[in-house]
Image (cartoon, rainbow, N blue to C red):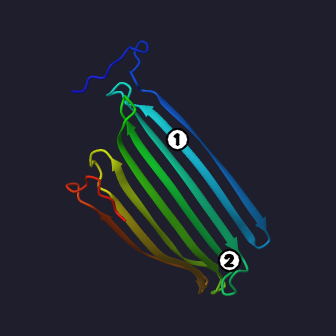
Amino acid sequence: PICLARNANGKDKLNNSYIESEGGSFGLTHVDDDGYLGFAISNHQNEYGNPIEDGAKFDMEIDRYDLAYESKTLFDFVDKFKFKFGYSDYEHQEIEPLGDIGSEFLKETFEGKFEFIHSWFNSPGVFGIDMGKHQFSKSQGDPFIANNHAKKISLYFLEEFNLLNQKFSVGFRQGYDRLDANSFISDDGCSIA
């Protein structure tokens, strides 16, 4: 069993069990009769102690960037076009009591979406593409998690139409996902391009 030290910082307090969190976000959007264009950036940081090892801590930080766009006049064959893009950068460090980095994990994620809204059948319809990728790597420490990267793409549509005084909806989504990871056995400093 693991014995966790108590009372060094006060009665019934678990040693080194603190947590500090901060973050914020900022965004700008331009809106007109045609649609909008918006951008946002955010940052969140967490630091918390490791009760198992006095003085050790975990430090996590994530930066995220988002772009969103909508236009009613960009294409003649649809009523509205939407586009979204997101990027996030995640860093996780496990820091030893003397300040050395015992383990470090990094993850980059890209996400995108194209959407077309129309009224071809005198009723609303939409079709689009979702796509994304991420890359996860361990730059220091033991191989608890294998380095890996993933890709995904999906096609979808949803149509509504009226027939014989009835409303019908037809939807479809087909996705493709691929995950590649190296072996735990050969994970000593191995990286994935």
Left or right, 92 with reference to 113: left
Quarter of the picture containing the N terminus is top left
Crowd rating for badge 2 (residues with CA inside 10 Å; few <14, some 14–19, many 20+): many
**Which numbered disc flags the more N-terminal residue, 1 or 2?**
1
72, 38: nearer the viewer: 38
Left or right, 114 with reference to 32: left
Disc 2 element: strand
Q: Tell me the tag on residue 45.
A: 1
Left or right, 23 with reference to 191: right
- Which residue carries the number 2 mark? 80
Q: Tell me the tag on residue 172.
A: none
**Residue at 47% across / 67% down in the picture?**
132
97, 21: nearer the viewer: 97
13, 100: nearer the viewer: 100
The correct choice, above or below, for 49 with respect to 125 in the image is above
Q: Position of residue 106 (x, y in %)?
A: 41, 52
**Residue at 50% across / 45% down in the picture?**
61
**Residue type, numbered disc 2:** Lys
Q: Position of residue 125 (x, y in %)?
A: 60, 79
Quarter of the picture containing the C terminus is bottom left
**Residue type, numbered disc 1:** Gln
82, 37: nearer the viewer: 37
**Residue at 53% across / 36% down in the picture?**
21
